[in-house]
Image (cartoon, helix red, strand yellow):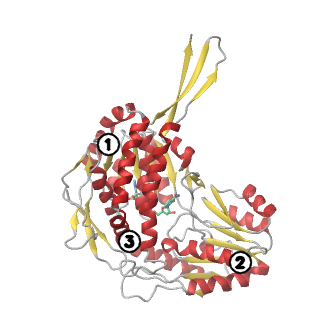
Amino acid sequence: MTRIPAKAFEGKPQDYRNYIDGAFVENGAAMIEVLNPANGQLLGRIPETGADQVDAAVKAARRAQGDWEKLPAIERAGYLRKISAKLREHRLELADVIVKEQGKVRALAQIEADFTADYIDYMAEWARRIEGEVLTSDRPDETMLLLRKPIGVVAGVLPWNFPFFLIARKMAPALVTGNTIVIKPSEETPLNAYLFAELLAETDLPKGVFNLIGGRGATAGEALVTHPGIDLITFTGSVATGSHIMQAAGRNLTKVNLELGGKAPAIVLKDADLDLAAQAIHASRVINTGQVCNCAERVYVERPVHDALVEKLAVLFNATRYGDPSAADDLDMGPLINRAGLDKVAGAVDLACQQGATVVTGGKIADLPEGFHYEPTLLTGVNAGMDIMRRETFGPVLPIQPVDSLDEAIALANDSEYGLTSSIYTRDLNAAMKAARELKFGETYINRENFEAMQGFHAGRRKSGIGGADGKHGLYEFTVTHTVYIKG
Ligand code: NAD
């Protein structure tokens, strides 16, 4: 086994192997290099999995599923707890891997590693709470049961922005409800998943229940989501890929659960605590270098407090500390994930300026010797027609638009192809409740920004997704309902 050393990635970069049917299997010819986005350091290589190994992983998951389903849920939960205990033992090492391959600052990477273990335990707690229903029948001497059963074999396709947590968000509810899973991490950030598999392999989880395959979307990902042996595809990533996967899933009529992009609006009313609003919105915009699906991407502020809010935000944006998170622990943000991510953000700001926006802070690629760093950027003079207010930027860029009323703010917020999260800042309960009623989003934060809680339900409307994750409702996405009529 190629064990990642305690201080991750010191020494010669290693080749990692897929985990299929309880074993680390030999790689094919093609490998993908994984680089540190802050400094270009080669961290390791993962397999570009071919269709044959994808098939082997799905078949292994299928073979394991029957016995796994028959185990009492509380025993399945016991395995999940063994995995979370392993993650806790290696929490520093895991955070180090996330820092290096994703570019997250260490404090956030540690939160991600710890939250992942907590999430697995939380889902394990559902073991004794998975419920069906008993119904009265229209016929005499008949009882109806609605049984909740596992769907079967799940494919989990992951993004790179919270790569480690997303393993748990797919794997834990799948396994506790009796499914088995094949995970494909993003080719940008796969190494944390390989470490996860190595830790999982140290437990006695039955073989085939969890399988890991590496590779690019167009190859390994495509082979996985079009495999006829998959019963549910749970995907987190971009709208474009989600839409493609949904079409590909149509071939086998495979069920999809899609967690896609966002363009979260933050509404600031004139009675709001402006310091609170500015701090929350700034923190939300720079956390993970703005690469978060549910962080404020556009602000609608009532005109009388527009200038005051911009002034407060400008102070915070100017004070944002950024750089290489492998080299310093006191940073607010690291680099963007790759060259394409940097070019996309730079292009979005340039286009906004051409369309009439004014740069208050930042506005260009950061002057650092290496890595994909962009300056924390505040834009004013924007309007609803501009791309910067409509398309997901996924970087540390915040456009602010003045509005004349709450009604106008709600209308602008809802006029978006995205519908993941939204927020409002006000001291007026009636205004907050009106926003909660009228905002058409999966989540609304009142007087705060992200993150979501594991017991909530994280789900997007419109192009932000289909279905959701977390809590009871997220858990039940991994089940099918089977109706039984009992005569007698
Ligand atoms: P992406 O769509 O580029 O890639 C996501 C995954 O899909 C990767 O593993 C990739 O290899 C795979 N993939 C690509 N093409 C595929 C194909 N044809 N078949 C199968 N798999 C394929 O997304 P990304 O850039 O990794 O992630 C960023 C996006 O994810 C943003 O839009 C962000 O908003 C979104 N996101 C959403 C949530 C949420 O909960 N709604 C959470 C995190 C990220």
Q: Are marks 3 and 1 in contact (CB under 8 Å)?
A: no
Q: Which mark is residue 58?
A: 1
Does ligand 1 reach within 8 Å of label 3's beta carbon? no
Q: Which mark is residue 99?
A: 3
Residue with the mark numbered 2: 274
Quick one: 388 or 470, which is closer to the camera? 470
Q: Position of residue 265 (x, y in %)?
A: 65, 67
What residue do we see at 55% from left, 68% from top?
392
| Marked residue nearer the N-terminal end (2 or 1) | 1
Q: Position of residue 418 (x, y in %)?
A: 60, 60
What residue do we see at 26% from left, 53% from top?
18
The quarter of the picture showing ligand 1:
bottom left
| Marked residue nearer the N-terminal end (3 or 2) | 3
Label 2 packing within 10 angstroms: few (<14), some (14-19), many (20+):
many
- Left or right, 458 with respect to 201, comes to right
> Which mark's residue is nearer the viewer, 2 or 1?
2
Q: Position of residue 187 (x, y in %)?
A: 34, 62
Determine which quarter of the picture holds residue 6. Answer: bottom left
SS for callout 3: helix
| Marked residue nearer the N-terminal end (3 or 1) | 1
Quarter the N terminus occupies = bottom left
Number of numbered labels in the structure image: 3
What residue do we see at 60% from left, 82% from top?
378
SS for callout 1: helix
Marks 3/2: CA–CA distance: 32 Å
Would you place residue 169 above or below residue 427 in this image? above
- Left or right, 223 with respect to 118, comes to left
Marks 2/1: CA–CA distance: 52 Å
